[in-house]
């Protein structure tokens, strides 16, 4: 299957699962707040349809066009983040000011656009500096300053997780660009130390981090989220309690339709449902890596790799927090959790990935069976030492037609000679007056400056009873030869 079709199938499945599970997980909370169980579902459905339309439109545009928008989008993201931090009209939810109210009940989150802006900007810079990446200054400038600027503005909201995700995108692009391991190790070590310092700087982050180590130490406060999500996952069993029959969504699991939607999936659909979602993200990671490897130029490789890192890392952090393997950071599951800005930006970036997948170089469609059959036919290759099994696979391939060349190829090139037998030499026709070659005659050496010796006279059989006439004939023939010389 081509990478394009594989990605389209995975994206559509994840969006469909997300819309259905948002309806199931938000019905109770929506009825309690708005008096309508379908309010959140309607918003998510509108965002999903609009996002898919944007993805389809972006996938039809050459991905190289978006390279020109890296710097302008970077400037716009910086200004929008400054507006959120400085302007009093910024919308605050849960102690963080992350949104801009654009009217009509719609909100815009600039930090979501900042992820795509950083990705396009860094991919463009690394592509233009392809011949200078061996120098550390050109490798880190201006990637590192742009990364630090966006991270500082996002941390001012505050939003630690988005800062870490921006760091993961920039780090992944430097890895794809071929940065030395010692440089990447140093940047990673500095990032870990800085992240730990940011966690310890805020009291609520510190309590949340230590509650991850022991949720039962404070089950009614800092460990409440993890305990309730684990109960939801455990009560689902293998096949779940049924779609829409969750009990933990009745105000037990906080943020059931955003950050902890994976727990509701595990409760209603069971282990089969959670493994399905995990498997879809694994397939997405495989397809994204394949698109990045088959990209025709560095910008496409950086862009495809960055989008893949962005979505896969977000999914891992969300699922790890829900099951209690990672600290809770308030990360929604990509393409599944409720969200308008994140849905639009993610689907737009996936449209760019789909356009790269449409222009990838096709690989040779040659099966392992046909390769084995060809190796057996030539008596070479990796089948040495495994002749019986290789011959069996070769016969199966020949019978099934996997290794049979097409008629056009046979007509154009003709049958290929076998390498086992050398080509036969055809005998040259001899002239009737030529003397037969003597097999025991040794080749004569010719010295420089000396004329070759005349060939010896032919012996003729003397007829019986006429010896005198034969001698005269031979003498006359020799005299004629001397005269001609």
Image (tube, rainbow, N blue to C red):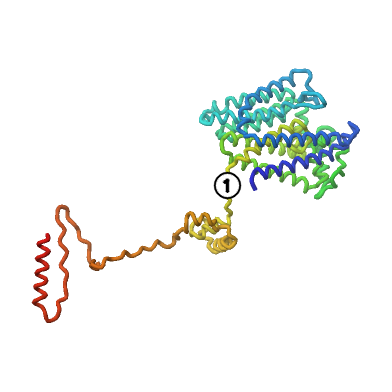
Q: Can residue 181 be seen in this view?
A: no
Most foreground residue, 279 or 226: 279
Question: Badge 1 local density, few (<14 within 10 Å), some, or many (20+)?
Answer: few
Residue 374's place in the image compared with 228, above or below, is: below
Residue 257 location, x and y as percent?
Answer: 81, 36
x then y, percent, for residue 122: 61, 29
Left or right for 381, reference 106: left
Residue 41, visible in the rendered structure: yes
Q: Position of residue 28 (x, y in %)?
A: 88, 37
Q: How many labels does the image show?
A: 1
Q: Please give the name of the residue rendered at 66% of the width and 30% of the height, measured from the top-left corner.
A: 167
Label 1: state its secondary structure.
loop
Give whichever of 402, 333 is nearer the camera.
402
Q: Which residue is drawn at 85% across and 47% down?
A: 242
Q: Is residue 2 left or right of residue 268?
A: left
- Looking at the rendering, which quadrant does residue 213 occupy? top right
Q: In which quarter of the image is residue 138?
A: top right
* Residue 477 horizontal/vertical position (percent): 12, 68
Q: Residue furthest bottom?
A: 465
Closest to the observer, 344 or 154 = 344
| Residue 178, above or below 398 | above
Which picture quadrant has residue 79?
A: top right
Q: Mark 1 points at which residue?
A: 363
């Amino acid at each position: 299957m081509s990478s394009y079709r594989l990605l389209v199938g995975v994206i559509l499945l994840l969006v469909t699962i997300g819309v259905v599970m948002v309806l199931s997980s938000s019905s109770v909370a929506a009825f309690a707040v708005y008096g309508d169980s379908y309010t959140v579902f309607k918003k998510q459905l509108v965002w999903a349809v609009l996002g898919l339309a944007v993805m389809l439109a972006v996938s039809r545009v050459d991905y190289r066009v978006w390279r020109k928008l890296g710097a302008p989008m970077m400037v716009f993201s910086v200004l929008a983040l400054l507006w959120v931090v400085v302007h009093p009209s910024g919308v605050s939810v849960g102690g963080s000011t992350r949104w801009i109210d654009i009217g009509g009940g719609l909100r815009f989150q600039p930090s979501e656009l900042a992820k795509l802006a950083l990705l396009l900007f860094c991919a463009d810079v690394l592509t233009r500096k392809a011949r200078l990446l061996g120098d550390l200054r050109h490798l880190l400038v201006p990637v590192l300053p742009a990364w630090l600027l966006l991270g500082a503005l996002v941390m001012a909201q505050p939003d630690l997780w988005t800062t870490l995700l921006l760091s993961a995108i920039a780090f992944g692009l430097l890895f794809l660009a071929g940065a030395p391991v010692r440089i990447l190790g140093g940047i990673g070590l500095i990032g870990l130390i800085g992240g730990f310092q940011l966690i310890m700087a805020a009291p609520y982050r510190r309590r949340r981090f230590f509650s991850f180590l022991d949720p039962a130490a404070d089950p009614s406060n800092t460990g409440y989220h993890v305990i309730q999500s684990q109960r939801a996952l455990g009560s689902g069993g293998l096949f779940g309690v049924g779609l829409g029959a969750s009990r933990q969504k009745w105000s037990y699991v906080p943020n059931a339709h955003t950050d902890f939607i994976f727990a509701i999936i595990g409760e209603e659909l069971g282990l089969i449902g959670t493994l399905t979602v995990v498997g879809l993200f694994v397939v997405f990671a495989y397809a994204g890596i394949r698109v990045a490897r088959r990209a025709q130029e560095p910008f496409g490789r950086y862009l495809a790799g960055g989008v893949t890192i962005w979505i896969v890392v977000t999914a891992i952090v969300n699922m790890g927090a829900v099951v209690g393997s990672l600290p809770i950071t308030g990360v929604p599951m990509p393409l599944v959790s409720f969200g308008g800005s994140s849905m639009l930006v993610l689907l737009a970036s996936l449209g760019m990935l789909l356009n790269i997948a449409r222009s990838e170089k096709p690989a040779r469609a040659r099966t392992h069976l046909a390769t084995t059959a060809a190796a057996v036919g030539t008596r070479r290759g990796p089948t040495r030492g495994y002749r019986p099994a290789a011959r069996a696979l070769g016969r199966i391939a020949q019978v099934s037609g996997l290794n049979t060349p097409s008629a056009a190829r046979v007509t154009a090139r003709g049958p290929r000679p076998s390498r086992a037998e050398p080509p036969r030499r055809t005998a040259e026709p001899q002239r009737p007056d030529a003397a037969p070659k003597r097999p025991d005659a040794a080749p004569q050496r010719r010295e420089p400056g000396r004329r070759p010796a005349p060939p010896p006279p032919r012996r003729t059989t003397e007829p019986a009873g006429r010896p005198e006439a034969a001698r005269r004939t031979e003498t006359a023939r020799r005299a004629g030869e001397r005269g001609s010389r």
